[in-house]
Image (tube, rainbow, N blue to C red):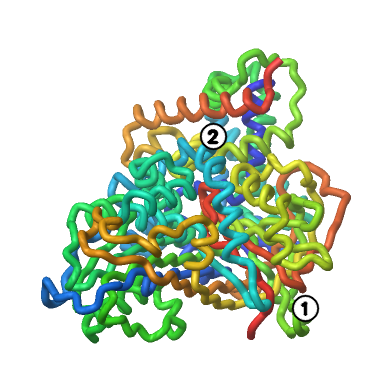
């Protein structure tokens, strides 16, 4: 091997890696209309409710008790090319946490691969052919915050599930994962958390500070059930999801007896690196479990790597900012539920998130990809699934179990989840004339396959750093 | 002019494509070539050759990123020129680039080892994917765009000494990655 070989290898890195690093002055392009927009919000409401009626208020009014510090986008001069910095100049800990994550990325992948795959099976298995979507990294964060609030057996259950040897390790991991997932450059990924306390809770400030510093969680207190507190709460949710869930969130009507709500939202927006050409769209049918549904398919032919298993085939499609969307199509006759429980598929999920090229059954081909345009919503109650995964204590805790937070007796009662995900080919009309990769002297692969997602399939949105931002089972296409 | 319109001009064999490409990407290609070859004349010739290569190749090839395509062609032309004229040339950017990249060579590998270029590119691309964004940008800016550390420093505000240290660590990291992938004898 010669230095020239390395030079040549660098010459032929992917286009998106080049675009990612190009000098800042031309990043204005990235604030153009998006091609794909995925947004999810988890609302754990009510996550925690009073078991003891008649608690007396200890405080009055509403107040913020702890505040997360996010990097703010620098959009000064964004309308003039050459002056857009395009990069968030955040507090140093964000950069530090991100670097720490990447230093340990392989370890995280090995440690959490099973959790990602198991939670996908638990939360994406549909009962009645409905669409199921959830955010693994939001779930990880919510469980981490929950572990901070309790101790003893309930805490140990969570540590065991998340493969952390102790609460300090979990705290560090959650902070690093948050930092690694955070993006406001070529894509947007903002995981936001909050704690909403009743004025009747005798809270302990240190744990709120830990949540703010390590989980980027805001904390508030107020009169549970009051119009004022509900409005502040709803405004926070709307702001953190950029209004994308407006109209989908249930009217916030908090229970006056509740002691605490714990919210986690995740707002995500990205753009295909190679957009679909609207002129190539076709009308067709999606074969859901109970009917054929008319829908629009976006089509693209491209040289790509595909991954195979006994019961599935998978391809990924890149987005700006080193993000990707992985599409997994079960073989004919295999349902998404069956595939989610398939040990080989679970292994694939874990291996893919560690390093896709470690999966043996892969090959390059010209892939004729057809993806339905969709705009899906999903609502689920996650508490039964968490119990199935071994998290029981926080739902049953007796007095003293939540002593890091308060000396009062309470337990979690519900974990609700609302999510919306949409993809399309959006972009300037006629912008997607690009068909084939021109770079490189390699001949195109001889194999050509059709991958038509016209029946239920699975997907995963994977962020920079191989973190699963969303996973979903698309079982029907609702117009 | 937007890239899609430039490519439409290429497809229609409209020579305006050349002038529009030169206007938009000429300085960018010139910078890459100049950084590698260290000669204004050579760099200008490389850029002209790159534009001609674009004219010959588009169509049938349709680059999805015109920037990446032109930069890649310019790099290839620059390295070809460097190789053919190395004996008669004084020290240039390419020398220092290759000297730095020699740090990435796995221990025990031989200069005569035949390398599967496609496989090596895949390994480098995957290694890049695993880097923190800040390091990924630094590596690509230095070794793909061929920007000097002084230029990167001026943009990021990070001291050149610190950047040099980080690029050294990145080269060592790539070397370790290649060794893990079995690039030793």
Percent x, y of residue A84: 38, 58
Q: Is residue A467 left or right of residue A84?
A: right
Please give the name of the residue rendered at 56% of the width and 29% of the height, measured from the top-left corner: B174
Q: Residue most toward the front?
A: A398
| Residue nearest the observer in this picture, A246 or A330 | A330
Label 2 element class:
helix
| Residue nearest the observer in this picture, A164 or A184 | A164
Subunit of label 2 = B
- Give the mark count: 2
Subunit of label 1 = A
Percent x, y of residue A331: 81, 62
* Residue that label 1 marks: A287
Please identify the quadrant where the C terminus of chain A is shown.
Answer: bottom right
* Residue that label 2 marks: B143
Please give the name of the residue rendered at 44% of the width and 69% of the height, measured from the top-left corner: A42
Label 1 element class:
strand
Percent x, y of residue A185: 43, 57
Mark 1 vs mark 2: tell me if same chain: no
The local crowd at label 1, few if under 14, some if 14 to 19, many if 20 or more residues have their Cα within 10 Å, is some
Residue A364, above or below A410: above
């Amino acid at each position: 091997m010669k230095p020239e070989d390395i030079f040549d290898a660098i010459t032929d890195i992917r286009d998106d890696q080049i675009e990612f690093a190009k000098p800042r002055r031309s990043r204005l392009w990235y604030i153009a209309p998006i091609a794909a927009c995925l947004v999810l919000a988890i609302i754990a409401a009510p996550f925690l409710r009073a078991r003891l009626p008649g608690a007396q208020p200890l405080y009055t009014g509403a107040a913020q008790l702890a505040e997360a510090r996010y990097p703010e986008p620098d959009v000064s001069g964004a309308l003039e090319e050459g002056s857009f910095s395009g990069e968030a100049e955040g507090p140093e800990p964000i950069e530090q946490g991100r670097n720490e994550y990447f230093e340990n990325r392989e370890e995280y992948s090995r440690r959490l691969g099973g959790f990602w795959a198991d939670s996908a099976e638990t939360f994406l298995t549909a009962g009645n052919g409905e669409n199921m979507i959830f955010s693994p990294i939001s779930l990880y964060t919510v469980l981490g915050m929950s572990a901070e609030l309790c101790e003893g057996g309930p805490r140990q259950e969570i540590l065991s599930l998340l493969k952390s040897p102790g609460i300090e390790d979990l705290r560090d991991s959650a902070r690093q994962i948050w930092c690694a997932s955070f993006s406001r450059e070529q894509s947007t990924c903002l995981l936001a958390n909050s704690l909403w306390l009743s004025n009747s809770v005798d809270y302990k400030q240190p744990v709120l500070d830990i949540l703010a510093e390590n989980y980027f969680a805001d904390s508030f207190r107020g009169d549970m059930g009051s119009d004022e507190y509900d409005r502040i709460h709803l405004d926070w949710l709307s702001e953190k999801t950029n209004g994308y869930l407006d109209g989908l969130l249930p009217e916030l009507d908090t229970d006056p007896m509740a002691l605490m709500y714990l919210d986690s939202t995740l707002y995500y927006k990205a753009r295909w690196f190679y957009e679909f050409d609207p002129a190539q769209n076709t009308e067709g049918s999606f074969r859901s479990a109970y009917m054929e549904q008319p829908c629009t398919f976006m089509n693209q032919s491209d040289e790509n790597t595909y991954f195979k298993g006994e019961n599935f085939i998978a391809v990924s499609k890149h987005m700006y900012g080193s993000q990707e969307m992985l599409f997994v199509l079960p073989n004919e006759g295999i349902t998404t539920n069956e595939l989610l429980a398939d040990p080989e598929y679970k292994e694939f999920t874990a291996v893919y998130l560690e390093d896709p090229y470690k999966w043996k059954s892969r090959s390059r081909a010209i892939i004729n990809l057809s993806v339905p345009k969709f705009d899906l919503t999903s609502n689920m109650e996650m508490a039964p699934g968490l119990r199935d995964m071994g998290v029981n204590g926080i739902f049953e805790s007796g007095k003293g179990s939540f002593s890091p937070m308060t000396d009062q007796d309470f337990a979690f009662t519900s974990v609700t989840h609302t999510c919306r995900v949409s993809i399309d080919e959006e972009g300037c009309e006629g912008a997607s004339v690009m068909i084939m990769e021109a770079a490189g002297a390699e001949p195109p692969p001889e194999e050509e396959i059709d991958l038509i997602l016209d029946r239920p399939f699975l997907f995963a949105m994977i962020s920079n750093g191989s973190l699963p931002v969303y996973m979903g089972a698309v079982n029907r296409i609702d117009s | 002019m937007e890239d899609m319109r430039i490519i439409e001009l290429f497809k229609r064999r409209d020579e305006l494509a050349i002038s529009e490409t030169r206007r938009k990407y000429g300085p960018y290609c010139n910078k890459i070539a100049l950084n590698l070859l260290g000669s204004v004349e050579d760099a200008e010739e490389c850029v002209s050759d790159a534009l001609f290569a674009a004219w010959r190749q588009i169509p049938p090839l349709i680059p999805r990123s015109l920037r990446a395509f032109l930069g890649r062609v310019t790099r290839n032309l620059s390295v070809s020129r460097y190789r053919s004229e190395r004996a008669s040339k004084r020290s240039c950017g390419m020398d220092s680039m290759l000297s730095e990249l020699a740090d990435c060579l796995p221990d025990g590998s031989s200069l005569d080892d035949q390398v599967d270029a496609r496989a090596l590119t895949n390994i480098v691309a995957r290694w890049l994917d695993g880097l923190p964004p800040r390091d990924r940008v630094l590596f690509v800016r230095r070794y793909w765009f061929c920007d000097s550390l002084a230029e990167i420093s001026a943009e990021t505000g990070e001291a050149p000494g610190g950047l040099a240290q980080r690029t050294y660590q990145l080269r060592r990291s790539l070397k370790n990655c290649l060794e893990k992938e079995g690039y030793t004898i």
